[in-house]
Amino acid sequence: MTTVALSAHFDGKAIKLDEPYKLHDKARLVVVVMPDDEEREAWSRFSLTNLSRAYSDNEPEYTEADIRERP
């Protein structure tokens, strides 16, 4: 079987697929718990703030001459 990503939710008792999908008996699954909307928004704000700082107008332009190989 090929790897497939499926959307699902927890209804308080069991994990339910959001859309039907045929699984064979004893199919192996990996469950990833996604952050809730509030936490996701907080991480998005944090990321945008810090990316803005990293790529601000005051950030110097680096050239190939600034890149060095490690010994």
Image (cartoon, grey):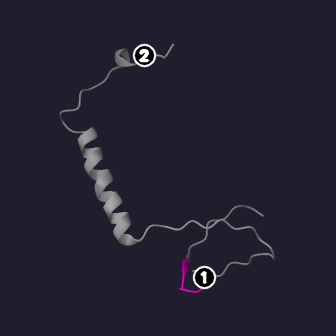
Q: From the top left corner, tell me how far across and down residue 60 is, in percent.
A: 24, 27
Residue placed at 75% from the left, 76% from the top? Answer: 23
Q: Secondary structure at mark 1?
A: strand
Q: From the top left corner, tell me how far across and down residue 69 is, in percent.
A: 47, 16
**Outermost residue to the left:** 58
| On-image quarter of the N terminus | bottom right
Q: Is residue 34 left or right of residue 24?
A: left
Q: From the top left corner, tell me how far across and down residue 16 is, in percent.
A: 60, 82
Residue on which disc 1 sits: 16
Residue 67 position by quadrant: top left
User: In this orientation, which residue lies closer to the viewer: 20 or 53?
Assistant: 53
Q: Are marks 1 and 2 in contact (CB under 8 Å)?
A: no
Residue on which disc 2 sits: 68
Mark 1 burial class by Cα count in 10 Å: few <14, some 14-19, many 20+: few
Residue type at mark 1: give it: Lys
Q: Which mark is residue 63?
A: none
Residue placed at 23% from the left, 32% from the top? Answer: 59
Q: Earlier in the sequence, mark 1 or mark 2?
A: 1
Which stretch did the figure color magenta?
9-13
Residue placed at 33% from the left, 20% from the top? Answer: 63
**Residue 42 among those drawn in magenta:** no
Residue placed at 35% from the left, 58% from the top? Answer: 43
Residue type at mark 2: give it: Arg
Q: Is residue 8 above or below residue 31?
A: below
Q: Secondary structure at mark 2?
A: loop
